[in-house]
């Protein structure tokens, strides 16, 4: 037994060493860490427990029978992040370029099943060359098993994809099915067809990064929620994200001791937000004033900048914040902002994260381009997400809230539990100038001095239908509050709604706009 124990230890030491120093040096030369180095950064020290580390493929042909390394190019197991269990798999690019074969896929299937049954988050560290061509259709079937499990676990456990190398073809669809995607500038790419195929089909010359790099997917396509300059900061932010998420959809997000008093006044907001609805300001500064310690994690920070989506804490409790950003196109809603907000709202609802919506919106973006690309369909996604959400929902109207965009930004009429407004609020079908031009068009045209009459009618319309208490008088706003009391009002309201119960009619599933 002693001899066999020594033999076992030697075997396991060889597994830990991997394919050797040369392969490791090549990985480092590419500016990338090894799979085990990444796992060590992600998980608490000494907490990783490996599963199926001795597994090897059984494929033959094309020389595979003479190359049967242990792990088969993927490391699977579990550990802890801040003491909480997290399951993980990491492609090892040093072995078969991290390409997926039958045994490789079976290991991933097992760890995904374990994560779902244990009710714990799953993090994938992706650095693979796609399907292992030598294994043919069995490799493709392996991807099918991964996709099926991604969908089955969707909304059940948090799924996080960290892109740390290439991800091409069908392999890109697994990250797209997960809740959050991280990428690293310069080393990670995602695309369905690579530059060579693009050139062959279209004649277009394009680099890997320009086609599917981190900048492209975090800024233009919206595929990546986060982009970082190095793997260390990327994996540290994955840990930070996990601190906001529950282990599964049956639990509430982890609370944290709040050193920041819940009743702290936010007097700075009186100076930060101009009363003039045409003057811009940075909504991020409002969020900083309201949340605990001014700390929050913005999701999709570089995409659809006219809407801010962030995870934060108020009085120690996790909240999801959706806010118009007047610094970018006046905070108007467009196709990308609607997509971004809908995804974020649905994610928060799936994982029991209350929603706080900060409103300063002039409407939906007009124009033929938006209409032809389907602003009706895409805008309806945000509406559908809010109407479906059963978590506590609180709306705060800071300044303008016009037209359909007011309704979509979680108004009382679509199910917000509480709606508050600052005394600078303007809730209306449209701005006073536009409304006067429509309602009083003939009267203005017939006036001796049309401009003077227009100004009078604008003032009259604003005084009668857009004064800050109009919506409150009709029960569409629960209270008009002092901006300096915003944090205290939110903290008290969230505490009152913490055990909110909601029921929905039986249905197999909804049919949201696509």
Image (cartoon, grey):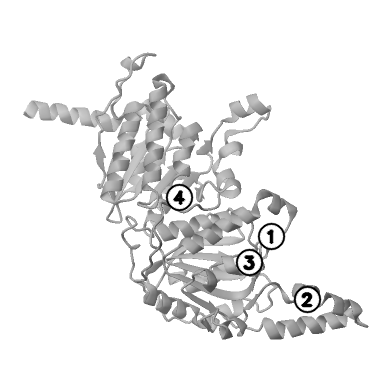
Nearer-the-camera pick, 76 or 381: 381
Q: Quadrant of the N terminus?
A: top left
Disc with the residue nearer the chain's start (2 vs 4): 4
Tag 1 secondary structure = loop
Is label 2 in contact with label 4 (beta carbons under 8 Å)? Answer: no
Could you say where residue 362 lies in the image, as x and y percent from the top left? 67, 68
Q: CA distance from mark 4 to mark 3?
A: 29 Å
Q: Residue at x 28, y 27 (%)?
A: 70
Question: What residue is pinned by disc 1?
Answer: 365
Disc with the residue nearer the chain's start (4 vs 3): 4
Disc with the residue nearer the chain's start (2 vs 3): 3
Question: What residue is pinned by disc 3?
Answer: 404
Is label 2 in contact with label 3 (beta carbons under 8 Å)? Answer: no
Q: Residue at x 40, y 78 (%)?
A: 261
**Considering only vertical position in the picture, is 45 above or below 262?**
above
Is label 1 in contact with label 4 (beta carbons under 8 Å)? Answer: no
Could you say where residue 426 lies in the image, as x and y percent from the top left? 65, 78
Could you say where residue 397 lies in the image, as x and y percent from the top left? 57, 75
Question: What residue is pinned by disc 4?
Answer: 180
**Considering only vertical position in the picture, is 92 above or below 401?**
above
- The 10 Å Cα crowd at callout 3, few under 14, some 14 to 19, many 20 or more, is some
């Amino acid at each position: 037994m002693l001899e066999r124990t020594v033999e076992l230890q030697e075997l396991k030491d060889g597994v830990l060493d991997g394919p050797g120093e040369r392969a490791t040096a090549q990985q480092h030369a590419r500016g990338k860490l090894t799979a085990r180095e990444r796992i060590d950064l992600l998980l608490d020290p000494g907490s990783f427990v490996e599963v199926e580390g001795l597994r090897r493929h059984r494929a033959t042909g094309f020389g595979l029978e003479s190359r049967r390394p242990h792990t088969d190019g993927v490391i699977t197991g579990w550990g802890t992040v801040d003491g909480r269990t997290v399951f993980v798999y990491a492609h090892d690019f040093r072995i078969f370029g991290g390409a997926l074969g039958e045994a490789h896929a079976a290991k991933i299937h097992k760890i995904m099943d374990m994560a779902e049954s244990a009710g714990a988050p799953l993090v994938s560290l992706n650095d693979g060359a796609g399907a292992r061509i030598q294994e043919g259709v069995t490799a493709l079937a392996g991807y099918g098993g991964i996709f099926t499990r991604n969908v089955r676990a969707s909304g059940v456990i948090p799924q996080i994809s960290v892109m740390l190398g290439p991800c091409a073809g069908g392999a890109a669809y697994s990250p797209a099915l997960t809740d959050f995607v991280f990428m690293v500038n310069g080393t990670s790419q995602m695309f369905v067809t690579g530059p060579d195929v693009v050139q062959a089909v279209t004649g277009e010359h394009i680099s890997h990064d320009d086609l599917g790099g981190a900048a492209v997917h975090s800024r233009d396509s919206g595929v990546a929620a986060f982009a970082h300059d190095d793997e260390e900061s990327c994996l540290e932010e994955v840990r930070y994200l996990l601190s906001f998420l529950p282990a599964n959809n049956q639990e509430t997000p982890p609370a944290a001791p709040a050193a920041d008093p819940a009743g702290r006044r936010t007097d700075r907001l009186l100076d930060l937000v101009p009363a003039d609805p045409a003057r811009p300001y940075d909504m991020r500064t409002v969020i900083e004033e309201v949340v605990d310690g001014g700390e929050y994690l913005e999701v999709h920070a570089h995409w659809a900048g006219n809407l801010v989506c962030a995870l934060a804490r108020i009085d120690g409790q996790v909240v999801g914040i959706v806010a118009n950003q007047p610094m970018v196109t006046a905070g108007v809603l467009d196709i990308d902002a609607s997509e971004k907000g809908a995804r974020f709202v649905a994610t928060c609802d799936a994982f029991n994260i209350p929603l706080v919506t900060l409103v300063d919106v002039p409407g939906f973006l007009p124009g033929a381009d938006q209409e032809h690309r389907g602003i009706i369909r895409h805008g309806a996604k945000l509406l559908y997400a809010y109407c479906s959400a059963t978590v506590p929902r609180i709306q705060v109207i800071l300044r303008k809230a016009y037209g359909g965009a007011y309704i979509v930004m979680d108004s009382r009429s679509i199910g917000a539990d509480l709606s508050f407004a600052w005394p600078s609020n303007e809730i209306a079908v449209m701005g006073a100038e536009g409304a006067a031009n429509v309602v009083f068009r003939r009267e203005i045209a017939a006036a001796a001095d049309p401009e003077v009459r227009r100004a009078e009618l604008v003032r009259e319309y604003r005084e009668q239908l857009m004064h800050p208490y109009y919506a409150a008088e009709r029960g569409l706003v629960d209270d008009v509050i002092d901006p300096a009391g915003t944090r205290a009002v939110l903290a008290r309201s969230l505490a009152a709604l913490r055990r909110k119960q909601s029921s929905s009619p039986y249905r197999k599933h909804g049919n949201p706009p696509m």
